[in-house]
């Protein structure tokens, strides 16, 4: 089976969450023996449809533009057995690159009017391939995809084989090692296998793909710290990740959320310990985290039996956390104090990922 995967994200090459999810779907399809070609249309020359209807009149079936769509993509689209349309969700629908691609498929219909199944439609000049819609969104609710889903159903009707929509995708990609996210990604691979084997994704697999992975509170806490750091440091998200930066918490709650979300259970295998913080300055208060059985538990207030207590101005610790200051140097300069098991402090750097 020949599959053409159209990816319309402009952030290809590591940053794109559309590309990230698409890779898992493609993996499953290839495992089932499909020949899959991914085309990043952002890199292609696809002119806007100018509505001249030349493809309906003077040169039936052939577009007036002589660009990558006419010469290459449209023939490949029509020759494929299945087409994946993968788009980031922009303003609750497909992005402009994908819309341009879709509009340029106009030559596959004839200009005439037909009344079929209760609606006016155009008869087909050539039968297009069935479609799988893939999209990712920044917001965590599934409802953000309602308009896109409705559009895809209206456009492709019974030719729409499956819809894979991942909300909170920016967040999800940071947590690929958590069991919940792994479950979703494995289900996307399984969805790819099923699409090739059975031409559809089973209800059970769809249910797994649609497992919620992020809640508003966590997403907003981390997202707000991330964007504020980008603004304060004058960097784009791409530069933020390239420089391996850390979002700067601006409250005890956001500090704990960051510790919880950044915890890497594999690195803390077999480790047990409790770290108490006594913060002073602008954000005063106490909080702690405890690691045991490869899990982290965070709480406000005092832990019952901490192994280590760090007493520090909040901003000093945030400087260390965000790598603006060196922990050892700040300790020598007596900017903070430590009581208890220093080993936990030394090791803790390893327990927390990006
Ligand atoms: C112009 C623009 C519009 C967006 N509109 C929405 C939106 O309506 N709803 C949403 O949840 N996310 C929205 N987002 C967030 C993107 O869907 C999200 O960042 C996604 O990961 C982008 O896909 P990519 O990583 O493949 O580029 C928007 C982003 C941009 C740049």
Image (spheres, grey):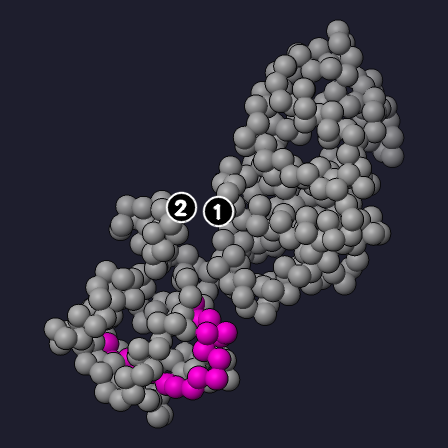
Q: Is 119 colored magenta in this rendering?
A: no
Q: CA distance from mark 1 to mark 2?
A: 7 Å
Residue 226 vs residue 126: left or right? Answer: left
Q: Which residue is disc 1 drawn over?
A: 15
- Name, please, the residue furthest toward the top: 58
Q: Is residue 198 visible?
A: yes
Front residue of 250/113: it is 250
> Is mark 1 in CB contact (under 8 Å) with mark 2?
yes
- Label whose residue precedes the other's in the sequence (1 or 2): 1
- Looking at the rendered structure, the secondary structure element under dot 1 is loop
Give the residue drawn at x 73%, y 58%. 190
For label 2, count other residues whose C-alpha is less than 10 Å away and answer few (under 14), some (14-19) or many (20+). few
Q: Is residue 286 visible?
A: no
**Residue 294, which numbered label?**
none
Give the residue drawn at x 22%, y 66%. 326
Q: Position of residue 100 (x, y in %)?
A: 61, 27
Residue 307 vs residue 55: left or right? Answer: left
For label 1, count other residues whose C-alpha is less than 10 Å away and answer few (under 14), some (14-19) or many (20+). some
Give the residue drawn at x 35%, y 93%. 305
Q: Quadrant of residue 191?
A: bottom right
Counting labels gives 2
Q: Is 276 colored magenta in this rendering?
A: yes
Quarter of the figure that contains the C terminus: bottom left
């Amino acid at each position: 089976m020949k599959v053409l995967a159209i990816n319309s994200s402009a952030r290809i090459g590591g940053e794109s969450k559309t590309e990230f999810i698409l890779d898992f779907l493609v993996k499953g399809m290839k495992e089932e023996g499909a020949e899959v070609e991914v085309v990043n249309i952002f890199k292609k020359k696809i002119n806007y449809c100018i509505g001249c209807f030349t493809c309906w009149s003077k040169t039936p079936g052939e577009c007036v533009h002589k660009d990558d769509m006419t010469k290459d993509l449209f023939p490949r689209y029509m020759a494929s057995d299945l087409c994946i349309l993968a788009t980031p969700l922009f303003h609750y629908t497909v992005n402009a690159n994908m819309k341009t691609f879709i509009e340029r498929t106009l030559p596959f219909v004839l200009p005439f009017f037909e009344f079929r199944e209760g609606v006016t439609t155009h008869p087909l000049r050539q039968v297009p391939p069935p479609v799988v819609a893939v999209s990712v969104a920044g917001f965590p609710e599934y409802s953000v995809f309602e308009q896109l889903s409705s559009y895809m159903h209206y456009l492709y009707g019974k030719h729409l084989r499956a819809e894979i929509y991942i909300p909170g995708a920016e967040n999800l990609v940071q947590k690929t090692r958590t069991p919940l996210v792994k479950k979703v990604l494995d289900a996307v691979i399984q969805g790819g296998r099923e699409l090739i084997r059975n031409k559809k994704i089973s209800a059970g697999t769809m249910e797994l793909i649609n497992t919620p992975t992020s809640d508003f509170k966590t997403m907003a806490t981390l997202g707000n710290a991330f964007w504020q750091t980008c603004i304060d440091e004058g960097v784009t998200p791409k530069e933020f990740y390239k420089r391996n930066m850390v979002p700067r918490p601006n409250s005890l709650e956001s500090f704990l959320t960051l510790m919880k979300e950044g915890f890497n259970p594999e690195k803390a295998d077999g480790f047990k310990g409790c770290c108490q913080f006594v913060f002073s300055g602008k954000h005063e208060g106490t909080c702690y985290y405890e690691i045991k059985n490869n899990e982290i538990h965070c709480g406000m207030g005092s832990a019952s039996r901490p192994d280590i207590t760090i007493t520090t101005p909040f901003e000093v610790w945030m400087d260390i956390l965000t790598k603006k200051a060196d922990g050892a140097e700040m300790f020598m300069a007596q900017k903070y104090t430590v009581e208890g098991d220093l080993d936990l402090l030394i090791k803790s750097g390893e327990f927390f990922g990006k």
